[in-house]
Amino acid sequence: MNMPGYVIGADIGGGSARVGAVLPSGVIVARARVDSSPRSGYKPLVKRVRTAVERIMTAQKAQPMAMCVACAGAVDFSRNVISRSPNFPSWRDVPLAEDLARGRNFPVILENDANAAAFGEGWIGGARGWPDFAMLTLGTGVGGGIVLGGAVYHGYNGMAGEFGHLPMSAARLKCGCGRTGCLETTASAFGVARLAAGILNTKQGAALHRACQGTAKKVDAKLVADLARNGDMACKTIMRGAGTELGETLGALTLSMGLTRFVIGGGMAGAFDLLKAPMRKGALARAYTLNARSLRIVQAELGDDAGMLGAARIALGAIL
Ligand SMILES: [Zn+2]
């Protein structure tokens, strides 16, 4: 009996890589996780991913129709290399797709991981069926991707959708990129935790202080969200501020690109119930062209699989 055709989606993160065999319907039939810590070097990583693909091929008794590998970093599509990656500082112009395709009879496509995650959400996730939207991923920073006309919009070096470094934060805090006022200084999981840690020893931070026993390191976005849900004013203010600035960013995207649909993912999307109302308000206040009926803001649905599934969809697109 012939096995149904499948593709492979791979999502290389700064700690682990996900590799999955995916059917054209979006069903994951096999998956593997391999170590991808930056310490171990480029060649051993390529070898581990190749081994994971081999195992999948053996188990499926067939080779995939195509593969797409999604990875953090700037992608030079004209040369098919990752020119630089924040997760792998030693990489310079690495031909990741070529190295994974060597000796194989199927094509391997390269993509930026945030773009792939957005594409995955547009395929079978929260943005399903939307031809035009942006995804914002709220994690350590604020990343994202843009889908236009049902295709990933790459922009310069595949880096369109770097929303975290737009100057949307009123607090003018210093960002990891060296500038001040970047959105992610206040509206990422890290930014929210840092703002909360900053008020730990003040009167309004009393509930926070009790919840983390006065230890700043124990303050994270989830704790801030939990306290906000319990009615703590200071935590509510921090979450509302993050939501408002995210919303103003969405409004800026409406003004600049005409986008009205947005999907919110990443760890801090767990606080979507707290963020949604201020996000809507912020977007509508910022963009005079926007009306409440056209504005759609939804939560991502694919979790940590978004990048892998989006990569699989990109691989499918290359052969169908
Ligand atoms: Zn920045």
Image (tube, helix red, strand yellow):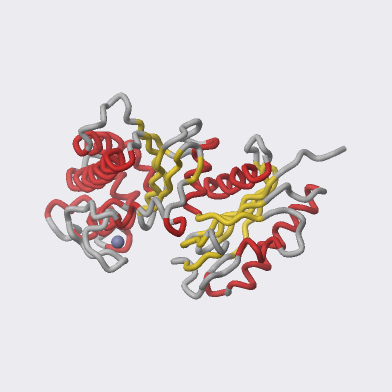
Specify the quadrant of the image occupied by residue 319.
top right
Q: In this rendering, would 51 be left or right of 187?
A: right
Specify the quadrant of the image occupied by residue 141.
bottom left
| Residue shown at 78% from the left, 47% from the top | 60
Position of the C terminus by quadrant: top right
As drawn, 155 above or below 94: above
Q: Can the viewer see residue 18 in this picture?
A: no
x and y, in percent, of residue 286 in the image: 20, 39
x and y, in percent, of residue 118 in the image: 47, 44
Of the four image quadrants, the one with ligand 1 is: bottom left
As drawn, 156 above or below 231: below
| Residue shown at 17% from the left, 43% from the top | 233
Asked whether 183 or 197 is in front, the reply is 183
Disc count in the image?
0
x and y, in percent, of residue 153 in the image: 46, 47
Q: Farthest residue toward the left?
A: 203
| Residue shown at 54% from the left, 60% from the top | 78
| Residue shown at 27% from the left, 64% from the top | 175
Q: Can the viewer see residue 176 in this picture?
A: yes
Position of the N terminus by quadrant: top right
Asked whether 176 or 132 is in front, the reply is 132
x and y, in percent, of residue 127 in the image: 46, 35
Q: In this rendering, would 79 be left or right of 218?
A: right
Q: Farthest residue toward the top?
A: 293
Q: Farthest residue toward the right?
A: 1
Q: In this rendering, would 171 be left or right of 43?
A: left
As drawn, 195 above or below 117: below
